[in-house]
Image: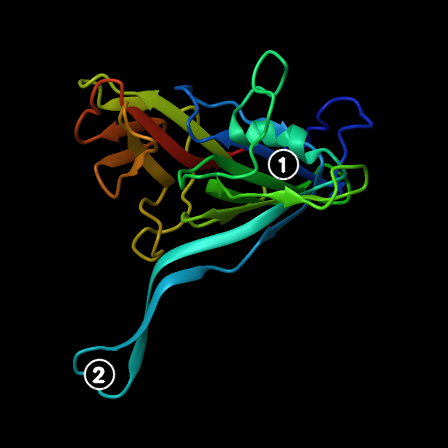
């Protein structure tokens, strides 16, 4: 998706509140592809992302520091909600949940999510009033959908989809976009070719929850696992070559999230 995309001809059913914004998602459990194709989402009225919450906060003292205390914070989590315009929400939810919502596929949405595994990665693109110039984008990795309800399924009502994530959301600058590549290990291959050249997101040594300078994350998911395991080390990225210190086991999915120039 280019930042200047108009997403086809206007359609009365494909509307949203933010006239200069674009929203897209990609399933975390997508099959191997470099890159995984994102799905454009319509009918978004608003996105609310709350400040970080901490599962563990404690006042501690550093050795030799006297009475000066230090706040120790662990287990970060971000919560938020997506508000859909009118009755579009349930149609768009199929893209978030990865189901085929038709009479030939799944014909019912359940109103709860009884696991805590990542569902989608979401990118919200903000453009200037010329409807073309990219200003910035907000990327929410590993979004986990929560249970939902609605006041009224009829026209002009709001459908609110709550979510949470334990991976830090990012705001990325103009002219960049998120990329999600998925590879399959074969127990011998250590070098994988990414679909783009990753930009430096920050310095891993200075950012508390950034594991790599260029990668938002690398995960390995075994065939029987429900989600990928975050890799704190063992990978490096130079130009478009992702190199593993140890070859991923056969059928292991290698999930890579990074940012490239548009």
Q: Nearer the viewer, residue 109 or 76?
A: 109
Q: Which residue shows up at 79% across the image and 37% down it? A: 154
Q: Looking at the image, is 170 positioned above or below residue 184? A: below
Residue 167 position within the rendered picture, expressed as x and y whole percent measured from the top left: 41, 47
Q: Secondary structure at mark 1?
A: strand
Q: Which residue shows up at 31% across the image and 27% down it? A: 254
The residue labelled by disc 1 is 23
Residue 125 position within the rendered picture, expressed as x and y whole percent measured from the top left: 62, 40
Q: Quadrant of the N terminus?
A: top right
Q: Nearer the viewer, residue 120 or 38?
A: 120
Q: Nearer the viewer, residue 196 or 224?
A: 224
Location of residue 65 by image quarter: bottom left
Q: Which residue shows up at 63% across the image and 36% down it? A: 23
Q: Secondary structure at mark 2?
A: loop
Residue 259 position within the rendered picture, expressed as x and y whole percent measured from the top left: 46, 37
Label 2 crowd (10 A; few <14 / some 14-19 / many >=20)? few
Whether residue 231 appears in this view of the structure is yes
Closer to the chain start, of discs 2 and 1, is 1
Q: Nearer the viewer, residue 247 or 205?
A: 247
Badge 2 vs badge 1, beta-carbon distance below 8 Å: no
Image mark for residue 65: 2
Q: Looking at the image, is 48 positioned above or below residue 118? A: below
Whether residue 41 appears in this view of the structure is no
Residue 35 position within the rendered picture, expressed as x and y whole percent measured from the top left: 45, 23
């Amino acid at each position: 998706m280019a930042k200047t995309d108009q997403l086809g001809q206007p359609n009365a059913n494909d509307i949203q509140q933010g006239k200069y914004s674009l929203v897209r998602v990609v399933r975390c459990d997508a099959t191997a592809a470099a890159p995984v194709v994102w799905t454009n989402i319509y009918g978004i009225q608003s996105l609310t992302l709350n400040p970080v919450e901490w599962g563990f906060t404690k006042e501690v003292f550093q050795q030799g520091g006297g009475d000066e205390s230090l706040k120790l914070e662990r287990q970060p989590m971000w919560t938020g909600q997506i508000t859909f315009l009118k009755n579009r929400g349930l149609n768009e939810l199929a893209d978030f949940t990865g189901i085929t919502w038709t009479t030939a596929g799944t014909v019912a949405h359940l109103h709860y999510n009884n696991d805590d595994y990542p569902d989608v990665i979401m990118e919200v693109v903000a453009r200037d009033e010329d409807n073309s110039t990219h200003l910035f984008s907000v990327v929410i990795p590993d979004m986990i959908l929560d249970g939902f309800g609605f006041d009224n399924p009829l026209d002009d009502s709001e459908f609110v989809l709550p979510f949470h994530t334990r991976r830090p959301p990012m705001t990325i600058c103009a002219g960049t976009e998120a990329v999600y590549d998925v590879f399959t290990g074969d127990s011998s291959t250590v070098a994988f070719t990414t679909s783009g050249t990753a930009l430096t997101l920050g310095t891993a040594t200075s950012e508390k929850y950034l594991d790599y300078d260029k990668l938002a994350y690398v995960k390995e998911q075994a065939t029987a696992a429900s989600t990928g395991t975050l890799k704190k080390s063992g990978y490096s990225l130079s130009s478009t070559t992702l190199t593993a210190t140890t070859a991923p086991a056969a059928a292991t999915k290698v999930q890579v999230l990074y940012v490239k120039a548009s």
